[in-house]
Image (cartoon, coloured by chain):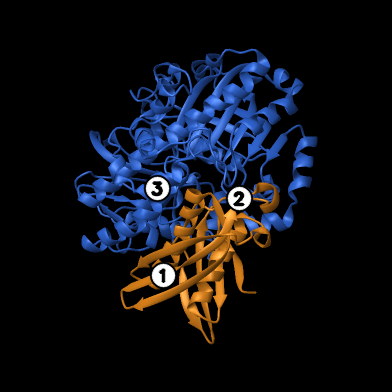
């Protein structure tokens, strides 16, 4: 399973798992949108460019997911796939990439809960053997 | 963590380590039990009470109301007041849904009126009030329009023809928070809100038609204009994406401020800034703008409810009056007595409604003598309560109230336990018509996934913080 939804009483956590850091971020983003829509139904018809920065990798994950929520509202889109490049180190991390999706179609996408924000609660970005994990709790 | 029992409804978390004040937890043993279970998922709430108690300038105590459960930085149900000179403003004390709150409308309709047209009422509300993921309001605003929303609050909506002038007197702050500065809010936050003014949202937000099942306090009920069998409408929502983005933006800004001013960060959402610092002032100006956004939002929705219902029952709009509108994720300057002396304090209420007691000048004139009403939300299938503020609540918890039942079960587990369609059918058999934009969302909000609101109300009333006025039951529920 490339992503998992983590149990949380009031809200929900997302965990992205990948063989690279970038893949883990991508899966965390897919997990986030899987809470909102029927992911396989969302076609990658439109591309949105993304750029975020943060002091830490954990901050970068929260900023990345937060940016996707902002773009959802601003463009009226939902996303099902992502490509990201991450570079940096020490106290400066930068993510550039694209999100692929289409305008929300309630009949087809079967909307679920609206995610309000990505939080630092339970945030972790780490390497575990040969895989990367990127996780945090979302405020619903 | 060792708690000292003060009474059946009150516990003290004594000062230890970095704590500047003790923690006061208002709860029954039944409520406290999951909080003390280290293996469970709620013990973190007490850790959060302790963290808040360690913040600079906190006055008297770090307070947990009876609906306490873990939040982000602050516990939900967390109340804390700070000295304006020495104290801080903390992002976690407001949260991501600034001024999320409840507007209650009182109608001259009786239960029988609604029962006769329940399906029609549900359909009209469902189609007329935008709700759920991706929904957009009728108002399409630009940055200039949003800036007006942020400066004027409910007054903005009224100017655009949403509502009746009488509404404003029954909204906290007259529906318009002073000190709001649109320039303190990022363009991204405003942009996210262009199409969201007048939308309900999703998750635990709802619109409910209820009837007054029982009245406990005749005097207060008379002051509020409530009778048994009367129809009320509760609107639960907040500042939508604009508030969420202010929260997201301030996480990073206040993290930098915490480090700059040497305030230890005990949890990432407990970042803060001294009230008098430029960072603290900017955050407050942004939050006050967010508060206005929520007031405007609920004002528009109240109008949409009138548009949906008034023609069905041949009512003029002003007959559906605003009983009150108060938020439960707020921070504001208020005057309170501290050791007999009146002082200005910055009061944070995260998941706690302001519930000022009798005599406070902030209360709308007709309610001044009995105290301000608050609404304590149950679930789609259970009772909710109308309580009022008390003298003791003023003295012990800065005039605060409980705000709702709180979840007992994760959304994932609720979805595994209930099916949306079946749940809605079963509630229908019990006389509660539910319309939901998302069936999965409805399953997540199943009554069984929530704690017992009766326990919360029992503790708030037992501790004397709030007093019971009436119990209401749902007839129609609209979910996002």
Q: Which chain is blue?
A: B
Q: In this orientation, which residue lies closer to the viewer: A134 or B412?
A: A134
Q: Residues within 10 Å of mark 3 (few under 14, many from 20)?
A: many
Question: Helix, strand or loop at disc 3?
Answer: helix
State if disc 3 and disc 2 touch (CB < 8 Å). no
Which of the image's four quarters has the N terminus of chain B? Answer: bottom left
Quick check: do tags 2 and 1 share a chain?
Answer: yes
> Which of the chains bears the disc numbered 3?
B
| Residue B330 position in % (x across, y down) | 39, 41
- Whether residue B478 sits left or right of residue A13 in the image: it is right
- In the picture of the structure, the residue carrying the numbered disc 1 is A95
Q: Which chain is orange?
A: A
- In the picture of the structure, the residue carrying the numbered disc 3 is B189
**Cα–Cα span, label 2 and label 3:** 20 Å
In this view of the protein, can residue B43 be seen by the observer? no
Q: Residues within 10 Å of mark 1 (few under 14, many from 20)?
A: many
Say which residue appears at 49% left-offset and 66% top-offset. A98
Figure check: A11 above or below B221: below
- In the picture of the structure, the residue carrying the numbered disc 2 is A104
Q: Residues within 10 Å of mark 2 (few under 14, many from 20)?
A: many
> Which of the chains bears the disc numbered 2?
A
> Which of the chains bears the disc numbered 1?
A
| Residue B457 position in % (x across, y down) | 55, 38
The quadrant where residue B290 appears: top left
- Whether residue B396 sits left or right of residue B418 in the image: it is left
Which of the image's four quarters has the C terminus of chain B? Answer: top right
| Residue B143 position in % (x across, y down) | 37, 40
Say which residue appears at 35% left-offset and 63% top-offset. B266
């Amino acid at each position: 399973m490339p992503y998992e939804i983590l149990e949380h009483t009031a809200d929900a956590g997302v965990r992205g798992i990948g063989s690279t850091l970038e893949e883990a971020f991508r899966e965390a983003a897919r997990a986030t949108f899987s809470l909102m829509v029927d992911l396989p139904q969302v076609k990658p018809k439109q591309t949105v460019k993304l750029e975020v920065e943060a002091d830490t990798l954990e901050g970068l994950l929260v900023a990345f997911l937060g940016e996707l929520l902002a773009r959802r509202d601003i463009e009226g889109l939902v996303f099902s796939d992502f490509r990201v490049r991450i570079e940096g180190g020490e106290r400066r991390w930068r993510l550039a990439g694209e999100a692929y999706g289409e305008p929300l179609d309630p009949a087809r996408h079967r909307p679920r809960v609206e995610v309000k924000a990505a939080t630092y609660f339970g945030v972790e970005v780490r390497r575990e053997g040969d895989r990367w994990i990127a996780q945090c709790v979302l405020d619903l | 963590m060792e708690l000292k029992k003060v009474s059946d409804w009150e516990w003290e978390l004594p000062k230890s380590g970095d704590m500047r004040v003790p923690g006061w937890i208002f709860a029954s043993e039944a409520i406290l039990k999951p909080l003390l279970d280290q293996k469970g998922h709620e013990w973190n709430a007490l850790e959060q009470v302790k963290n808040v108690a360690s913040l600079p300038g906190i006055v008297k105590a770090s307070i947990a109301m009876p609906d306490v459960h873990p939040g982000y930085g602050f516990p939900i149900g967390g109340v804390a007041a700070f000295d304006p000179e020495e104290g801080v403003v903390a992002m976690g004390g407001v949260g991501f849904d600034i001024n999320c709150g409840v507007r209650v409308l009182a109608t001259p309709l009786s239960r029988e009126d609604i029962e006769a047209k329940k399906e029609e009422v549900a359909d009209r509300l469902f189609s007329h009030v935008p709700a759920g993921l991706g929904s957009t309001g009728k108002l399409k605003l630009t940055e200039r329009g949003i800036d007006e929303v942020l400066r004027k609050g409910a007054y903005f909506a009224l100017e655009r023809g949403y509502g009746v002038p009488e509404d404003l007197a029954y909204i906290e702050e007259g529906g318009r928070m002073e000190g709001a500065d649109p320039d303190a809010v990022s363009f991204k936050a405003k942009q996210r809100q262009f199409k969201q003014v007048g939308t309900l949202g999703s998750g635990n937000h709802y619109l409910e038609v209820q009837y007054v099942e029982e009245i406990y306090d005749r005097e207060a009920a008379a002051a509020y204009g409530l009778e048994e069998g009367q129809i009320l409408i509760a609107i639960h929502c907040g500042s939508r994406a604009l508030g969420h983005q202010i929260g997201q933006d301030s996480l990073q800004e206040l993290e930098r401020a915490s480090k700059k001013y040497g305030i230890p960060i005990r949890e990432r959402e407990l970042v803060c800034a001294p009230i008098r610092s430029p960072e603290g002032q900017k955050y407050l100006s942004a939050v006050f703008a967010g508060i206005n956004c929520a007031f405007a939002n609920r004002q528009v929705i109240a109008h949409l409810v009138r548009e949906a219902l008034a023609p069905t029952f041949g009512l003029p709009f002003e007959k559906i009056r605003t009983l009150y509108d108060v938020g439960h994720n707020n921070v504001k300057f208020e005057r309170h007595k501290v050791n007999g002396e009146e002082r200005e304090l910055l009061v944070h209420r995260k998941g706690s409604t302001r519930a000022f007691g009798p005599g406070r000048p902030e209360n709308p004139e007709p309610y001044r003598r009995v105290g301000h009403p608050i609404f304590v939300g149950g679930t789609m299938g259970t009772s909710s309560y109308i309580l009022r503020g008390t003298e003791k609540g003023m003295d012990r918890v800065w005039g605060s109230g409980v705000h709702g039942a709180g979840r007992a079960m994760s959304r994932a587990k609720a979805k595994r336990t209930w099916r949306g369609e079946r749940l809605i059918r079963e509630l229908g058999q019990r006389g509660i018509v539910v319309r939901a934009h998302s069936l999965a969302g409805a399953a997540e909000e199943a009554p069984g996934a929530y704690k017992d609101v009766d326990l919360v109300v029992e503790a708030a009333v037992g501790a004397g913080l709030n007093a019971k006025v009436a119990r209401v039951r749902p007839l129609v529920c609209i979910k996002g």
